[in-house]
Image (cartoon, rainbow, N blue to C red):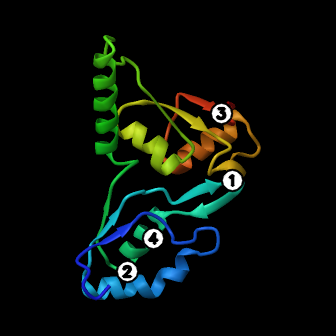
Amino acid sequence: MAEAEVALAIGLRDDMVETPADYDSELAEMKAKGLPMLCANPDLVVHRGERLVYCAGTLAANYEKLGGEAIYYGKPHRPIYESALAAAARAAKAVGRQNPKRPLAVGDGLLTDIKGANGAGLEALFIADGVHGEEVEPYSAEHLAALFTRFGAKAGSVTRRLAW
């Protein structure tokens, strides 16, 4: 870290074992050096099988709490949606199809996936049993509405899970 000019957060080194608290001293050292942090995945938590583990977004949020600068790439920030829509348009053109008229964002994180889709003006499908799985019980319209209100997000459709 002595020669570093920037920090890149892509996740915890061993997210099945570590927690963000394991990085407190490193984040403090980075802050003391004035390093900006590039957060390549703003998700706060993700699933690893059945387990919910911390992700790079939590490290970046903790760094900001220390007064450090974090620069985010990915959902919920608009450039990721613009890039995805441009790629979809190129792919459609390459096979002689029209540009997608009604793109749908699918996600299980209300703060990242769904709020990002809302900010980009996209329809959203919320996967309720994802990272918010324990928060969606009881699985009722009233409870889901309260959850959406709490996170300031909205989705045109909700499903418990995606089946393959």
Q: Residue at x 40, y 30 (%)?
A: 122
Q: Which image quarter: residue 143?
A: top right
- Residue type, numbered disc 1: Gly
Q: Which mark is residue 162?
A: 3
Q: Residue at x 37, y 80 (%)?
A: 66
Measure the C-alpha gap from mark 3 to mark 4.
28 Å
**For the residue carrying disc 3, how many other residues have a C-alpha within 10 Å: few (<14), some (14-19), or many (20+)?**
few
- In front: label 1 or label 2: 1
Name the quadrant of the C terminus: top right
Q: Position of residue 158 (x, y in %)?
A: 61, 32
- In front: label 2 or label 3: 3
Tell me the SS state at disc 4. Answer: helix
On screen, residue 158 versus residue 114, left or right, reads right
- Residue type, numbered disc 2: Leu
Q: Which mark is residue 59?
A: 4
Q: Residue at x 51, y 72 (%)?
A: 13
Measure the C-alpha gap from mark 4 to mark 1.
21 Å
Q: Residue at x 40, y 48 (%)?
A: 75
Q: Which residue is mark 1?
A: 49
**For the residue carrying disc 1, how many other residues have a C-alpha within 10 Å: few (<14), some (14-19), or many (20+)?**
few
Q: Which mark is residue 66?
A: 2
Residue 84 in the image: above or below residue 51: above
